[in-house]
Each structure stands twice: as C-alpha cells, then as structure tokens.
Image (spheres, rainbow, N blue to C red):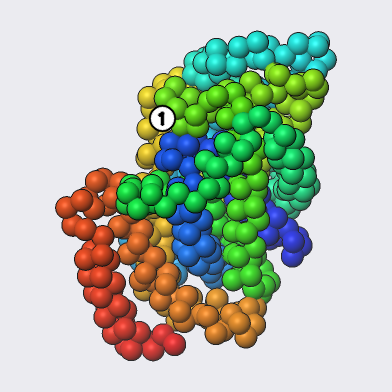
C-alpha cells in the first residue's frame, strides 16, 4: 500500500494553517490572556511565537518529510533506536489527552451553533436571555457529552475520507471564510462601547506587569504559543510526512506562524471589546473557559440581527475547530496505519472509540477539564516539543540540515546552521526553563544563571558532537 500524499502545493500549507487556526486562537487565547493580565502576556506570547514557534515548526516539518512516517515511526527510524520510538509514543499519547478536551469545547461550539441557527428560524435564541446560565448548562454534564460525541464523529468522518479527499478539501475553503468573517466582526466590535477600554487592556504596552511578572508569564505564554501553532504533539510531523516534493520548509513554517498570528490577534479584536462592553473582566473568576461563550452571547443578544451574526460566528468557529481536531486525531490514525497496517477507517474507529470515553470524562468533570485544558496540556506540549527539537539537533544533525536546505534556496542555506543551533540548544533550554517556572522553580535558581549554565554546557557538547560527526 503506497502512503498517501497531498495533492497540491497549497494543500499542505492550508491544512497546516487549518490545524494551527482553531479554538486556540478564538477560545483559549482570550481566556489565557485575560487570566494573565492582557498586553504584557501578549508581548511575551508574540515573542515566543516568532523566536521559538517558527524554527520549531520547521524542525517538525524536517522530521516529517525526512521520515515520511507517523511520530513513533519517524523518531524510531531516523534514530534507529526504540527509545526514541517511545518518545514518539509520548507524543501520540499527548495528542489523545489534547483531543479529549478539545472535542468537548468543539461540542460546546456545535451546541451554540445549533441554538443560534434554531433561533434564526424561530425568532428567539435560547441562550440570549441569560448567557451565564446558558453556558453553565452547556458546559459540563450529559448534554456536553452528547455534543462532544457529535463533534468527535464529524472529525472522524473527515479523517476517514483521507488526506486528499477529506483533510485537504475541507481545509481549503474554511480558511478564507474564517478570515473574512473575523474582519467583519472586528469592524463591528470596534463600534461597541467597551472598545477603547479593551484596546488599552489588549494592545496598550504594559511594561510594569511585564517587569513584575515576566517569569510568571513565561509558562502560560509558551504553552499558548505551542498550543496555537499545533506544536508538541506530532501534528506537524504527521502532516509533513505526507509531503512528497521539495518545497521550502522555512517558508512554509513562517507562513503558518504569520497566518495563525493574524487570525489570533483579529480574534482578540473581536472578543475583548465585546467582553468589556458587557463589563466582564477577561479572566474574571467564574468566566474562565466560558469567557468567549458568555461574553459573545451577551453581546450578540443585544443586537438587531444578533441571531444571524451568532450563527455565522459559531459556524466559522466550528469549521476552525474541525480543521484542527482532524489534525490531532490524524496523529494516532497515521500511527495505527503505519505501524499496524490498519485500514484508515478502522484506525479512525478505534481512536474515536477511545476518545469518546476520555472526552466524556472531561465533559462530565469540570475539575478534570480545567486541569487538562489549562495546565496539563502546557506541560505535555512543552516537554514533547523540547524532546523533538533535541532530536532534530542531536540525532538528525547533519540530515536535518540537508532536509532543511532541500528546496529552500540561498536564504535557507544561509540560515540553516544558526537554525540547527537554535533548535538543538537554545530553544530546548528555554522550553525546559519555562517548564521549571510552571513548577515554581525559578524563584530558587534564578533565570539568567540557569540559562547561562544550560546554554554553556549544551553549546560545548553540541560543538564537540558537531566536530565528531562533521554536521556542517
Ligand atoms: N492549534 C490548534 C488551535 O489553536 C490546536 C492544536 C494543538 C492542534 C496541537 C493540533 C495540535 O486550536
Ligand atoms: Na492556533
């Protein structure tokens, strides 16, 4: 059986952008940004997207295209070691944790879409009368389980249709629709009463918070940056494994990060003005994961034609969520197809059955959901990505450079060596440090001593390894 590939040049990039643009941009971003004080968080987050996200994306593409395998097969084959296969297994397992809560939020979206569309037909939207209570009833419990299963089922259906017929077709027209609608909604949101207060919170540069709480922001900002770029669970490895031509991987990585960031910032320009108009502090206790739903529902309800706007909005968010959830589920499907020779259909059914259960736990227990969606996923993604980057720098080494340069022209050639040093040494060091801050360690060790020591040790080791294997 020959392995599937993308049909068009554009297909891969749109699928990768489709994976990146999702609930992370529209639902998780305002929640986490609000929790961490707004603009200062935004600054740290954007810095990490640029300095960590772009090189890391390229690193994942390098692993995928070089190996043409799922994450387990990729790390095992490229290293010739089963231990690295286990690291791949960690990625696959993390992707299952991720899809378990992602699918619950996807279910909330479907429910709001359904109620909005129904309201359009009947003239009254159920959740408009009391957005807070409506979210409380939608969020955790049996109905949440039902909508989670619906969302998961839709995801599995696209997966079953395959790389070209399912994922590529689906993502091709979702992306422009999302973009246009967000621009329209952002223009409308700018006319709302809370707009200027919101812009100050979101865009005003707040150097005080930045200074006082820089280390506190690192963990959540790194987590959100990886989450939004679909890094750390093997999605980008998997998608790049279906590439068969030599296109510029650095160019593709930069495109994905830029497009994802544009959509993310736009979503903030829609969401924050609406929250402030309603007098809801983003991140206020009790709103949290529901900020998007409560805030937007409240705003839509006060508008003439609100049902129509709400329907359009939730339709677009549903599409964005689906184009991401397929990329998460595809990881374990490709694993079962590659490693166990399962048919795509059977693989999707097996993984779907498992996630039906694990997702239901998240849909029933708000405590589990909050821990998994807010904290655990940051830790899993950060650890997973750090391991993959160490792999690129230290195990692939010279092969990674060859793959990076292939198709990337003179500029790619020029930046390839600094890139390898960045992904092999600097970025993993940084990621491990952010992990430590998550566990509150920075207060005892201190940032610069840790970084200096780690970079020093790693650089010496890297240089000697480079000499031995003549990496460049
Ligand atoms: N990037 C997606 C989003 O922002 C989430 C995701 C994370 C998808 C990891 C795949 C892998 O919604
Ligand atoms: Na995203």
Specify the quadrant that holds the C terminus: bottom left
Give the total number of marks visible in the rendering.
1
Mark 1 sits near ligand 1, with its Cβ under 8 Å away: no
From the top left corner, tell me how far across and down residue 58 is, in percent: 54, 67
Residue 349 against residue 381 in the figure, above or below: above
Q: Is residue 51 rendered to the left or right of residue 435?
A: right
Q: Is residue 250 rendered to the left or right of residue 167?
A: left
- What residue sits 55% from the left and 24% below the top? 279
Specify the quadrant that holds the N terminus: bottom right
Residue at the extreme left of the image, as rendered: 444
Residue 152, quarter of the rendered image: top right
- What residue sits 81% from the left and 10% below the top? 122
Q: Is residue 212 rendered to the left or right of residue 52?
A: left
Q: Nearer the viewer, residue 35 or 99?
A: 35
The answer, for residue 194, to whether it is visible in the render is yes
Q: Nearer the viewer, residue 315 or 249?
A: 315
Give the residue pinned by disc 1. Answer: 370
- What residue sits 46% from the left and 82% below the top? 417
Q: Secondary structure at mark 1?
A: helix
Q: 10 Å neighbourhood of mark 1: few (<14), some, or many (≥20)?
A: some
Residue 411 against residue 298 in the figure, above or below: below
The answer, for residue 329, to whether it is visible in the render is no
Residue at the extreme right of the image, as rendered: 121
- What residue sits 42% from the left and 69% below the top? 423
Residue 427, quarter of the rendered image: bottom left
From the top left corner, tell me how far across and down residue 386 is, in percent: 38, 60
Residue 425, quarter of the rendered image: bottom left
From the top left corner, tell me how far across and down residue 356 is, in percent: 52, 28
Residue 463 against residue 32 in the figure, above or below: below
From the top left corner, tell me how far across and down residue 361 is, in percent: 43, 24
């Amino acid at each position: 059986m020959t392995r599937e590939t993308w049909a068009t040049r554009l297909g891969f990039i749109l699928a990768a952008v489709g994976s990146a643009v999702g609930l992370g941009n529209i639902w998780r971003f305002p929640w986490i940004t609000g929790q961490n004080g707004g603009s200062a968080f935004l600054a740290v987050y954007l810095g990490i997207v640029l300095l960590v996200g772009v090189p890391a994306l390229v690193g994942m593409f390098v692993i995928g295209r070089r190996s043409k395998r799922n994450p387990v097969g990729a790390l095992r084959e490229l290293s010739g070691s089963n231990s690295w296969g286990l690291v791949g297994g960690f990625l696959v397992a993390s992707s299952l944790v991720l899809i378990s809560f992602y699918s619950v939020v996807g279910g909330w979206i479907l429910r709001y879409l359904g109620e909005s569309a129904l309201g359009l037909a009947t003239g009254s939207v159920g959740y408009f009368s009391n957005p807070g209570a409506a979210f409380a009833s939608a969020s955790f419990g049996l109905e949440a389980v039902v909508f989670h299963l619906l969302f998961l089922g839709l995801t599995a259906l696209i997966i079953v249709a395959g790389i070209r017929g399912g994922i590529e077709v689906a993502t091709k027209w979702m992306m422009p629709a999302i973009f246009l609608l967000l621009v329209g909604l952002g223009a409308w949101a700018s006319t709302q009463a809370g707009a200027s207060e919101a812009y100050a919170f979101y865009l005003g540069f707040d150097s005080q918070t930045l200074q006082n709480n820089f280390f506190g922001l690192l963990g959540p900002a790194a987590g959100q940056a990886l989450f939004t770029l679909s890094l750390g669970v093997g999605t980008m490895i998997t998608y790049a494994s279906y590439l068969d031509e030599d296109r510029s991987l650095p160019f593709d990585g930069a495109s994905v990060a830029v497009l994802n960031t544009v959509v993310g910032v736009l979503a903030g320009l829609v969401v924050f003005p609406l929250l402030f108009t309603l007098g809801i502090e983003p991140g206020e206790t009790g709103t949290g994961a529901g900020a998007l739903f409560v805030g937007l529902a409240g705003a839509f309800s006060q508008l003439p034609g609100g049902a129509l706007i709400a329907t359009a909005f939730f339709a677009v968010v549903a599409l964005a969520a689906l184009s991401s959830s397929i990329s998460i589920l595809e990881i374990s499907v490709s694993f079962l197809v590659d490693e166990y020779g399962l048919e795509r259909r059977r693989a999707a059914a097996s993984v779907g059955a498992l996630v039906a259960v694990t997702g239901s736990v998240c849909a029933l227990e708000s405590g589990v959901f909050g821990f998994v969606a807010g904290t655990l996923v940051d830790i899993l993604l950060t650890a997973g990505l750090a391991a993959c980057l160490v792999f690129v720098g230290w195990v692939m080494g010279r092969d990674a450079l060859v793959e990076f340069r292939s198709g990337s022209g003179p500029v790619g050639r020029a930046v390839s060596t600094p890139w390898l040093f960045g992904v092999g040494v600097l970025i993993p060091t940084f990621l491990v440090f952010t992990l430590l801050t998550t566990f509150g360690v920075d207060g005892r060790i201190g940032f610069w001593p840790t970084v200096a020591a780690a970079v020093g040790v790693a650089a010496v080791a890297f240089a000697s390894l480079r000499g031995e294997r003549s990496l460049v």
